[in-house]
Amino acid sequence: MSTTNSYTVEGMTCGHCVAAVTEELSKLDGVSHVDVDLASGHVTIESNHPLDSADVAAAIDEAGYTISP
Ligand SMILES: [Cu+2]
């Protein structure tokens, strides 16, 4: 069963940032699709099982950005 989670990421300024976030999130186990909207910082993650929000936060941190609370 597919799960969709949305987050808002702070600090992205260009397509390179989008690519970095997309790459790190895509590495998470079970993630099937990542969609990032640069203008709003809105990130949608589709996965085939529910994700641990700590894992998502760690991946975004790894890319160099933070989740907006
Ligand atoms: Cu950038």
Image (cartoon, rainbow, N blue to C red):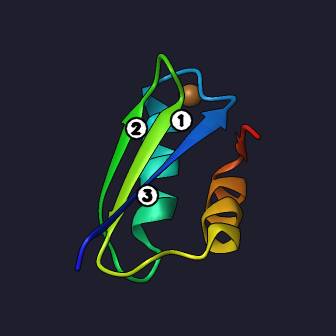
Residue 49 image offset from top left, x and y in percent: 37, 81
Residue picked out by circle 2: 36
Image quadrant containing the C terminus: top right
Marks 3 and 2, how far apart at CA: 11 Å
Q: Nearer the viewer, mark 3 or mark 2?
A: 2
Residue 35 drawn above or below residue 61: above
Image quadrant containing the N terminus: bottom left
Q: Nearer the viewer, mark 2 or mark 1?
A: 2
Residue picked out by circle 1: 17
Helix, strand or loop under label 3: helix
Chain-order first, disc 3 or disc 1: 1
Q: Residues within 10 Å of mark 1 (few under 14, many from 20)?
A: some
For image coordinates 69% across by 32% down, the residue present is: 10
Q: Amino acid at mark 3?
A: Glu
For image coordinates 50% across by 22% down, the residue present is: 14
Marks 3 and 1, how far apart at CA: 10 Å
For image coordinates 71% across by 47% down, the residue present is: 64
Residue picked out by circle 3: 23
